[in-house]
Image (cartoon, rainbow, N blue to C red):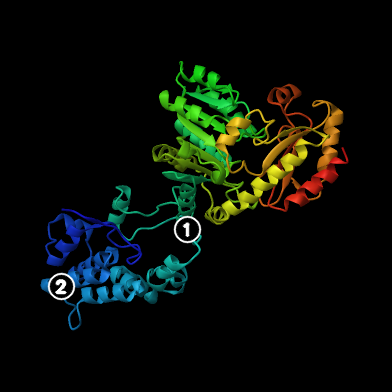
Amino acid sequence: RRFKVPSTRWVGRDDCGVMDLEVAFVGLSGLTTGSRVDAVVRGRTRTQRVAHAVCVGAADHPDPQSTVRAMVGLAAAAGVTDSGSDTIPTAAAAVVVRGKPDQTDDLLRPRAAHHAAVVERAQDQTRAVHGGERARGGKKARATLDAITTPVVLSSTFTFERTQDCIDYNEGRYESFEYGRYGNPTTRAAEEKLMALERAEDALLSASGMNAVTTMLLALVPQGGHLLTTTDCYRRTRQFMQTILPKMGICVTVIDPADIQGLRDVISREPKVNLFFSEAPTNPLLRVIDIPAIVELCRRYGCISCIDTTFATPVNFRPVEWGVDLVLHSGTKYLAGHNDVLCGALAGSKCYVDEVRKLHGVLGGTIDPHASYLVLRGMKTLGIRVEAHNRNSWNLAQFLAGHPKIARVYHPHLVTHPDHEVAIRTFQKGVGGVLSFEIAGDPWAPETFSATGRFVDSLSIPYIGPSLGGVETLVEQVCIMGYYDQPLEVRQRLGITNGLIRFSCGIEDSQDIIDDVAQALESV
């Protein structure tokens, strides 16, 4: 029988990759010539193979000490000794039991000593390039594993000890990285944290939210395919869908977020809908789609579902648990949370993330490792921050709902919201820090435009800016910040009035935000 024994922290980046027990025991007997094992452990002495077998077996067993005794016994029976000293397997086993993996690592990486010797013999310039770095393992390797904070790995290239490692990597037997565009250890740590938060099979980080959505669409909607989306949506996403995708023969159908019958009519007839995309809540009017109904229709007709939950975050809503195939984020916003990084994120079914990852490696929208670290760090406090965002937006929404200078408030938990019933079922904790509202007056009149500008300029706490999800409160007059270049008829069709405000609550004190908004409304 073959029992897989994975590499562990005890052996670091081990020379053989994933080993079989049969490899270990054949190594102990010395029967390697002409066997399958020879290709796996080529370049290693019989003694080194035994040391490796003992260390791997001991480190991975729930009872390491008894495993050490058993395997050392086999080593002794095989008569493997290091001339003039105790057996190397026994020494290696003792190192494992004593908890000194740095010494074990030296035993398992015989080329490290060779590299160190090369540097010692080299001239100054070669020493400058390779000194302190070429001989890896030991204390440096252990400290990397033991550091409480995930290291920022800035390397653009990842190397291999030998040609066989490259072959094993390409055939899936050697887990590592090759080139920064295809993956990075720091980025992968952030991806795995997002997977844990979203309960997703896989995740992919990219350079921006727009990179995440455009790469996803290009990877999953075929040439001549059919995309279905909703009216209220981030403008640049809709712009890509309606101006770029049609150049590839892709049909784009747009429906109202609440129009489930319209969704049913479109998705049940030809041409086949390949992918449904929307946001929850939507930007900027915070509409809420009926996720269970959408999932049921998408599954029935073989359509991929992808929901952008940048506004909600996995703290408030996890679409994967509702049966959605993919969830998308602008990680720039709540995930990172401090207005200091650009990031996009996709999580969900591994089969679809894999397809996107392949194209991502071609298009090259790679996130910088330091940016990945900032996202990784930001997600650690996501729950604490979102609790404050939820509270602040809800308190402000209730205050504005009864104010005479406010015509309308867009917050899904208000009973006046058109999707209130769906929102209460979907977002039980909250909807995040964003709410939108309209200053009273003729929605298309110049006077309303001016009054809205006076309100924004009279605010003291918020910054005027186009983003959201950070610890600082941000505010924007939507017709200026996101739609200034759009003609009136387009804005009228989308409901972007002259008095529309998008207000992204930070984590400041609720009463301070409300008091500031109240004094600013006096200028209207």
Asked if one can make out residue 280 in the rendered structure from this viewpoint, the answer is no
Query: In the displayed structure, does residue 23 sit left or right of residue 137?
Result: left
Q: Nearer the viewer, residue 64 or 178?
A: 64
Give how far across and how far down residue 72 sits, in percent: 18, 72
Q: Is residue 433 above or below residue 379?
A: above
Extreme residue toward the bottom, this view:
84
Q: Amino acid at mark 1?
A: Ser
* Proximity of marks 1 and 2: CB atoms separated by less than 8 Å: no
Give how far across and how far down residue 311 sits, in percent: 61, 41
Task: Give the quarter of the figure containing the C terminus.
Answer: top right
Give how far across and how far down residue 112 sits, in percent: 34, 70
Q: Is residue 482 above or below residue 53?
A: above
Mark in front: 1 vs 2: 2
The residue located at (48%, 20%) in the rendering is 267
The residue located at (60%, 47%) in the rendering is 332
Q: Nearer the viewer, residue 230 or 316?
A: 316
* Secondary structure found at label 1: loop
The residue located at (71%, 36%) in the rendering is 436
Query: In the displayed structure, does residue 166 sit left or right of residue 343?
Result: left
* Secondary structure found at label 2: helix
Tag shown at residue 155: 1
Q: Amino acid at mark 2?
A: Gly
Check disc 2 and report the residue beneath it. Answer: 73
Asked if one can make out residue 152 in the rendered structure from this viewpoint, the answer is yes
